[in-house]
Amino acid sequence: MAKFLHTSDWHIGRLFQNVSLLEDQLHVLRQIKHYALEHKVDALVIAGDIFDRAVPPAEAVDALNAFLADFMAELCIPVIMISGNHDSAKRLRFGAPFMSGSGLYILGDIRNVSTPIEVQSQTGPVHFFGIPYHDPVEVREAFDVDTRTYDEAHTHLVQLAEQARVAGVPSVLISHCFIDGAEESDSERRLSIGGADRVSYQPLVCFDYVALGHLHAPQYKGAEHIRYSGSLLKYSFSEYRQRKGVTLVEISAEKTSWQHLPLIPKRDMRVIEGSLDELIEQGQQDPRADDYILARLTDKQDLLEPMAQLRQVYANTLELERTRFSVSQGSQLVADVSNKRSEDQVFKDFFGQVMGDDLTDAQNELLLEIIDEARSTMEGEA
């Protein structure tokens, strides 16, 4: 059977909370190369969102160029990629006709959807059809058809590819789209407002395998062979439970099978929860203290620079959430001014954080006198 790796949503050059993920991306790309060698695949398929933006930074372009040059020179395996909604199709496909001679196929023109890339394997050829990201206007102008929705536009392109299928030759469709009802993540850029970007899975069923991109969670929708491989890495804390990886596909004219191959990140993205003191103690013993962290703090009182304290043990703490901050002993910590916290309570919490102890009775009495004096002064000035 022919074999290929299905991956998508690399987002090379992505920043997360102003932290560059390029080193993390190169770390897992090396694992993809290892899988390709280990499983002796016949092709690598990338289903869009190669870069994170239409005009990627120079270091992102250099990184992708270096990876592809090394991958193809050492393994001599064809690479087939389509453009996604984060990519500029025209920029991505620059020089594509010349690169195809060396085995790099960049499919960024919807007018070529009915022209398959033929990949040879020990069991015969496999045809790969690519549908780059598009909107209804692009399809309407390219084919002079009345397509007004994303679903109509995508269905038209799928039908063009279906008509070009060859009997007895396994066919793979590559598309960057949002299948209606599939699971989305916070890190995905919306294609349109109000769900108009959703497309139907039914037109895709006739292909032997459908390699999808755009959604970051590994999943299938409609039929098991219509699959999202998921993104290269976790790109938001909403994805922290997802198992990132690539999909190894084995295909023949008779059947298709697949399996998930995990990608192990250099730094994982995790959510930890507890009091500030508990998390600091935990971080001192945590072998994965370099992970990207969202910390959910259960402390009820004010905290003095909790982010700075956490970063002493978890250097890559990127977000904080206060799960129980609405209530503090002796006062309500809510936006309602009728229940706002008193000045003395704010100072007491601050004092406790700095000194590690409560105010004495004498100190508390002095504090109240100072607050009363300050109030009187402000009222007199008013």
Image: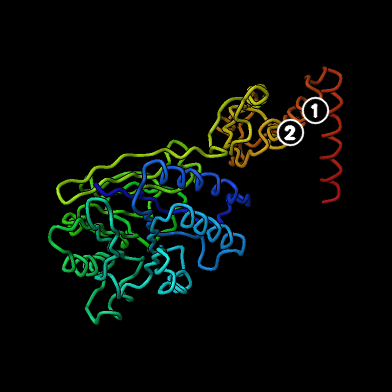
**Mark carried by residue 148:** none
Give how far across and how far down residue 141 sits, in percent.
Answer: 30, 81
Give how far across and how far down residue 316 sits, in percent.
Answer: 64, 39
Q: Secondary structure at mark 1?
A: helix
Residue, x 66% and y 28% (percent of image)? Answer: 301
N-term-proximal mark, 1 vs 2: 2
Residue denoted by label 1: 354
In this rendered view, identify the residue nearer to me: 271 or 29.
Answer: 29
Give how far across and how far down residue 111 sits, in percent.
Answer: 30, 75
Residue 361 vertical position relative to residue 270 in the rendered view, above or below: above
In this rendered view, identify the residue nearer to me: 164 or 375.
Answer: 164
Residue denoted by label 2: 304
Residue, x 22% and y 78% (percent of image)? Answer: 146
Measured in 3D between alpha carbons, the distance from the residue under mark 1 to the one under mark 2, in whole angstroms, is 7 Å
Q: Are marks 1 and 2 in contact (CB under 8 Å)?
A: yes
Residue 351 vertical position relative to residue 237 in the rendered view, above or below: above
Q: Say what amino acid the circle numbered 2 marks.
A: Leu
Residue 156 vertical position relative to residue 214 in the rendered view, above or below: below
